[in-house]
Each structure stands twice: as structure tokens, then as C-alpha cells.
Image (cartoon, rainbow, N blue to C red):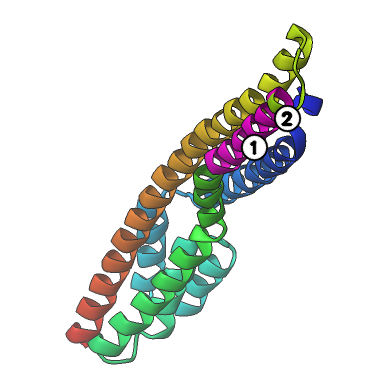
Amino acid sequence: MIVSGGPAFWILVLLAFVAVIVFLERFFELRRAQIDWEDFVKGVINVLESGNDAEALSICDETPVPVSRVVATAIRSRTASARVLREAVDSCGRAEANRLERRLAALGIIGQIAPLVGLFGALVGFVQTALLVNSEALISRAALSAASMQALVPAALGLAVAIPVIVMSGILNVRLDRLVTELEAAASRIVGYISTKEARK
């Protein structure tokens, strides 16, 4: 199969290797970023209610996840106006979402170009088959079969790489959407609490 696949085979193997590395890195990163945000925000609010803002910030700093960084930003901006507070939290939330999305586009690109690389390899194989047929009067079945494999292997491998990569991309995007939704909910909760608390002063 390696010989029959030609250069397209190695390109597709490389793409598959990169896709697996990116998937595993992003999967575990998104997994580490996920916490029970409701309990976390509730705990921080309880600390803030006792008037211990420094301890609340310490709790956020000891929990290195996107939700904690957004909450910490809100606490640090608690004395600002409601508009400034919201802008600071929104800016931090966008930065955290962008960080979580990092390298996810690579999976989408690999899923799109893998079939095209396979198709290119197949076309090269068909061209080589046509040249073989035109160059020799009598062609053995083995030679014709080998030439045909040069066209079929890259096409099949391109699909074999693209399908799992698309599935992996979908899995990560589902996790990412869930994290972003939780991030927005946590931001709204802490901003609402701080705004209400400041308004009572």
C-alpha cells in the first residue's frame, strides 16, 4: 500500500499524525478547562459577601481555568462603572474563548484537504496507468493491477483520514460550545452580583 500510494500516501499519513496530535492536545486542554462553574461562582460570591475580596481573588488565582479568570477580572473591576465592568469581563471572555479555540481550525482544514490530496494522488495514478497502457502493446494483469492501485489507494486513504478528522473536530467543537456557554453564564452571574452589590452602597 505504501508503494502503491506514492507521495500522496506520505502526505496523508503526515496529515493524520498532525490531526491526532492536535485532537489529543485540545481534548485534554478543554477537559482541564471544564469545572462546575455554578459551585465556583457561588463560592466566590460567598467570600465576597463576607467582605474578603483578596481571598476571592486568591481562589480565582488558584484555579487556572477560563471561568476563574473571567471572575477575577470582574472582581478587579468591581469599583468601575457598570459599562466598564461589562466591557472588561467581555474582553476577558473573548480572549479566553479565542485561547480555547486555538488550533481547532487546523482540524477543519485537514478534514477538508485530505480528500483533495487523495483525489490528486488518484489522478496521478490514473495518468500513470494511461501512460503504461499507451507505452506497451501487451500489459500483464499484475502490471495493470499495480497501476490501478496507485490510483485507488490515495483516494481511499484520503477518505479514511478525512472522516475521523471531521468526527474529532465535531467532538471538540461540542465541548468548546459548552465551555463558552458556561463562560458566558458565569460572567453574567458575577457581573450581576457585583453590579447589585455596588448599587446598594
Residue 43 at x, y percent in the picture: 40, 59
Residue farthest to the bottom, as pictured: 80
Residue in view at x 44 percent, y 62 percent: 67
Amino acid type of the residue tagged 1 in the rendering: Gly
Magenta-colored stretch includes residue 130: yes
Looking at the figure, which quarter contains the C terminus? bottom left
Seen in the image, is 58 located left or right of residue 47? right
Question: Which residue is under mark 1?
Answer: 121
Q: Which mark is residue 5?
A: 2
Residue 170 at x, y percent in the picture: 43, 40
Cβ atoms under marks 2 and 1 closer than 8 Å:
yes
Rendered position, 72 above or below 185: below
Residue 181 at x, y percent in the picture: 32, 55
Crowding around mark 2 (Cα neighbors within 10 Å: few <14, some 14 to 19, many 20+) is many
Looking at the image, how many numbered discs can be counted on the residues? Answer: 2
Amino acid type of the residue tagged 2 in the rendering: Gly
Rendered position, 195 above or below 138: below
Looking at the figure, which quarter contains the N terminus? top right
Query: What is the magenta segment's predominant secondary structure?
Result: helix
Determine whether the residue tagged by mark 1 lies in a helix, strand or loop. helix
Q: Which region of the structure is painted magenta?
A: 114-133
Determine whether the residue tagged by mark 2 lies in a helix, strand or loop. helix
* Image quadrant in which you'd find residue 123: top right
Magenta-colored stretch includes residue 86: no
Residue farthest to the front, as pictured: 137
* Image quadrant in which you'd find residue 3: top right
C-alpha span from label 2 to label 1: 7 Å
Residue 52 in view (yes/no): no
Residue 11 at x, y percent in the picture: 71, 43
Along the polypeptide, which appears first: circle 2 or circle 1? 2
Seen in the image, is 3 located left or right of residue 78? right
